[in-house]
Amino acid sequence: MTHILNKEAIKEYYGTILQGSNDLQTSACSCTDEGLTPSVKAALADVNDEVVKRFYGCGSPIPPLLEGCTVLDLGCGTGRDVFAAAKLAGESGRVIGIDMTDGQLEIARRNTELQMKRFKFEKPNVEFRQGYMEDLKGAGIAENSIDVVMSNCVINLSPDKESVFSEIFRVLKPGGELIFSDVFSGRRVPMHLQADPVLHGECLAGALYREDFRRLMTKLGCPDHRILTSRTLELGSRKIEEKIGMVDFYSVTVRAFKLPGLEDICEDYGQTATYSGGITDWPHYFDLDDHHRFITGKPMLVCGNTASMIEETRYGKHFDIMGDRSVHYGAFDCTPASAPDTGVQGSSACC
C-alpha cells in the first residue's frame, strides 16, 4: 500500500490554502537571487508584482541563449519564470507554461497583456495551458518540439516522476536542454510521510532521493546529468522538523541534455574545448556546471560527455572543440580544474 498524496490535494494547497509566498511554513519553496546573471535579474525585475507574490520556487533555472528558442516551463504557476524567459527569448521565441492549478493560471493569463507591453512586444510570445507534466502529450506538446524545458520546484510534487522525465525527453529536440531547480533529499522520505498535505505542499514529502534520481535518469537514457548549484535547506519550522527532521534536504539546480551516446562515466578521447566568451553575461568564463568552468580563450581538456554537451547543443557555436571519439585513452582523469568556488585554474575541466 502506498501513501502518495493525490493531485487534487496539491491543487487545493497551491490554489486555495496558499495566498502568497509568506504563507509557506518552510524555506524549501522560497526563491533566492543567489547566482542570477544580470540579464535574468533584469528580466525578473520586469515581472508584475501580482505574479511574483503568488509564485513559489526554490531557484532560478533560466539558462542563457534563449533568443529564438521554444521554451516549456513545467508547473509554471503564475508565470514568473515564463515571463522572464519570454523577455530573453524575444519576439522570435516562444514560451509555453503548463500548470494544473486554474487559480495560478488565471493570474498568469491576466498579466500577459501587461507583460507584453512592458517588453514592447507587438504580439504575445507566451501561452499558458492547463495540464499535467506527467502527460505533456495531453497538453498538446509534440515530440521533439522544445529547445529548453525548465521547472522551478515543482517536479517534487508529482506522484509519478518517471512519467515526468520520460515526457521531458520525449518533447525535447535532439540536443535540447533540461534545466530545473528542485528539492532533493539525502535519503528516501519515509513512506508514511508522503501523504501529509503540508509536507507535500512544502516540497518536502515528494523530494527525490539523489541516487534514485541518478538511477532514473540513466534508465531513461541520460546517464550523465550535471549539478549547477546545491545548497542545504534549513526548514525553519519546529513543527515541520519534528515530523520530517530525520531527512536532509537540498535545493539543487540540474542541467541535462537530450543527447545520444553519453556514457555513464567520464571517458578520455583527448578532446579539448575553448570558450570564445560570446555568451551574454559570461564574457570571461562560462560555467557549464559546478565543476566545469571554461576560461575564455583557454583550451581545456574535456571528457567525451562534456564535449558532446557543448558541441551538439546550442552552446556549440561559442566553443571550439578539437578532437573526436576515434581514439580512446581510458577513463578521464578528474584532476582539479578551474573550479568556480575556489578560483584555482588547471589544465582540464574536471568531470
Image (cartoon, helix red, strand yellow):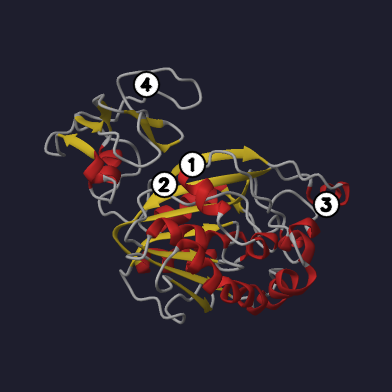
| Residue 38 tag number | 1
Distance from Cα at disc 4 to Cα at disc 2: 19 Å
Residue indicated by mark 4 = 335
Query: Which residue corresponds to the image point at 53% horizontal and 59% vertical from the top-left?
Result: 81
- Residue 277 lies, in percent from the top left, at 30, 34
In this view, the residue farthest toward the left is 326
Q: CA distance from mark 3 to mark 1?
A: 35 Å
| Secondary structure of the residue carrying numbered label 3 | helix
* Mark 1 residue element: helix
Tag 2 or tag 3, which sits nearer the N-term? Answer: 2
Residue, disc 2: 225
The amino acid type of the residue labelled 3 equals Ile
Q: Three-letter amino acid code at disc 4?
A: Thr
Give the Cα distance between marks 3 and 4: 41 Å
Residue at figure coordinates x 36%, y 65% from the top left: 91
Q: Residue type at mark 2: give it.
A: His
Q: Earlier in the sequence, mark 1 or mark 2?
A: 1
Dot in front, 1 or 4: 1
Assess whether mark 4 and mark 1 are in contact (beta carbons under 8 angstroms): no
**Labelled disc at residue 240:** 3
Indicate the secondary structure of the residue bearing disc 2: loop
User: Does residue 196 appear anywhere in the picture?
Assistant: no
State the residue in front, 316 or 247.
Answer: 316
Camera-nearest label, 3 or 1? 1
Q: Quadrant of the C terminus?
A: top left
30 up-or-down from 193: above or below: above
